């Protein structure tokens, strides 16, 4: 169909094929306030819902209360956009979705841009349930994927239906990282929890070949058999006098750490006091 100077309205529902409807119209012409779709002679498209503002950018849509762009497909793309130099898919809505796409067996929203942004999302609502982009996999049983991040059509990271994140490259975080489950490093033994605290100790004078047990320390969460690492400053270990003290610790009772200090050789140490760090690793 070729029309030189009229705008057309259309309701399109794809059953698995793209290119089901082809329209040519004059650029940026709107027939009535209920116009839904306009396709310009250069191939660009703009859309709006009833009563919505007229878009000024080809390829962009706007809505005051409904969907800016909405597409449904059984076997192909719900919404498909391509732009050589700008945004592949862009939609604006004051109170609903800017762009909404659904597909049973393909992509809900698919955008391509050679030199711009393929899909752009922007949200002004500060509600905790609002977001610039929401990806929902409605399949039952947490199967499939919520998000695939690809480069050159090769998946580099993914978020599956259970929320598990897999990345083939490096992951860098400038803020804090919190994991409620275990952490596995380099394919080794999973770490369930890491606990750490500092405390000030006082070490009495210990004669050579003798040891001293320090007063027990309260450490919430400590369990019998936990792995313990001690961070001891050099001033608590040795001095110019020539002694070298050895420290070791263990969980002597629930929530309780005991530290023992030995002087295997050299002269007796002077009375020492200072901070020590105790780390616990749970597996």
Image (tube, grey):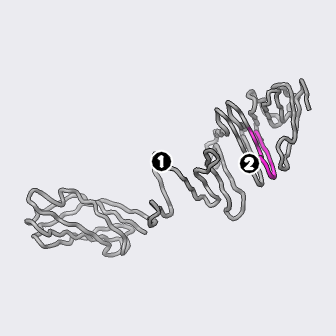
Relative image position of residue 59 (x, y in whole percent): 75, 32
Q: Quadrant of residue 110?
A: top right
Dot 2: element: loop
According to the image, label 2 marks what residue? 108
Q: Residues within 10 Å of mark 2 (few under 14, many from 20)?
A: many
Position of residue 109 measured from the top left corner of the image (x, y, whole percent): 72, 45
Query: Looking at the figure, which quarter contains the N terminus?
Result: top right
Q: CA distance from mark 1 to mark 2?
A: 30 Å
Query: Is residue 221 shown above or below 22?
Result: below
Say which residue appears at 31% left-offset and 63% top-offset.
278
Q: How many numbered marks does the figure carry?
A: 2
Q: Which mark is residue 173?
A: 1
Give the residue displayed 61% in from the left and 43% down from the top: 126
Q: Quadrant of residue 246?
A: bottom left
Q: Is residue 125 left or right of residue 53?
A: left
Q: Quadrant of the C terminus?
A: bottom left
The region drawn magenta spans 65-81
Q: Nearer the viewer, residue 28 or 202?
A: 28
């Amino acid at each position: 169909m070729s029309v030189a100077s009229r705008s057309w309205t259309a309701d399109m529902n794809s059953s698995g094929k793209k290119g089901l409807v082809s329209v040519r119209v004059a650029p940026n012409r709107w027939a009535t306030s209920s116009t839904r779709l306009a396709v310009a002679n250069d191939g660009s498209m703009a859309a709006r819902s009833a009563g919505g503002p007229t878009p000024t950018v080809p390829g962009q849509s706007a809505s005051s209360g409904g969907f800016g762009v909405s597409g449904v497909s059984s076997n192909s793309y719900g919404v498909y956009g391509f732009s050589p130099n700008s945004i592949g898919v862009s939609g604006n809505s004051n109170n609903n979705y800017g762009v909404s796409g659904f597909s049973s067996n393909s992509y809900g929203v698919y955008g391509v841009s050679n030199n711009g942004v393929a899909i752009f999302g922007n949200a002004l609502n500060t509600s905790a349930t609002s977001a610039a982009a929401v990806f929902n996999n409605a399949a039952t049983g947490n199967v499939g994927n919520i998000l695939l991040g690809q480069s050159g059509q090769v998946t580099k990271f993914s978020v599956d239906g259970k929320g598990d994140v897999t990345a083939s490259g490096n992951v860098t975080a400038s803020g804090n990282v919190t994991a409620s489950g275990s952490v596995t490093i380099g394919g080794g033994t999973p770490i369930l929890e890491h606990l750490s605290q500092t405390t000030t100790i006082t070490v009495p004078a210990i004669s050579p070949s003798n040891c001293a047990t320090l007063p027990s320390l309260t450490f919430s969460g400590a369990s019998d058999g936990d792995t313990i690492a001690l961070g001891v400053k050099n001033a608590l270990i040795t001095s110019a006098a020539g002694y070298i003290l050895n420290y070791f610790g263990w969980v002597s009772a629930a929530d309780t750490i005991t530290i023992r200090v030995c002087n295997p050789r050299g002269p007796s140490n002077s009375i020492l006091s200072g901070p020590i760090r105790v780390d616990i690793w749970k597996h």
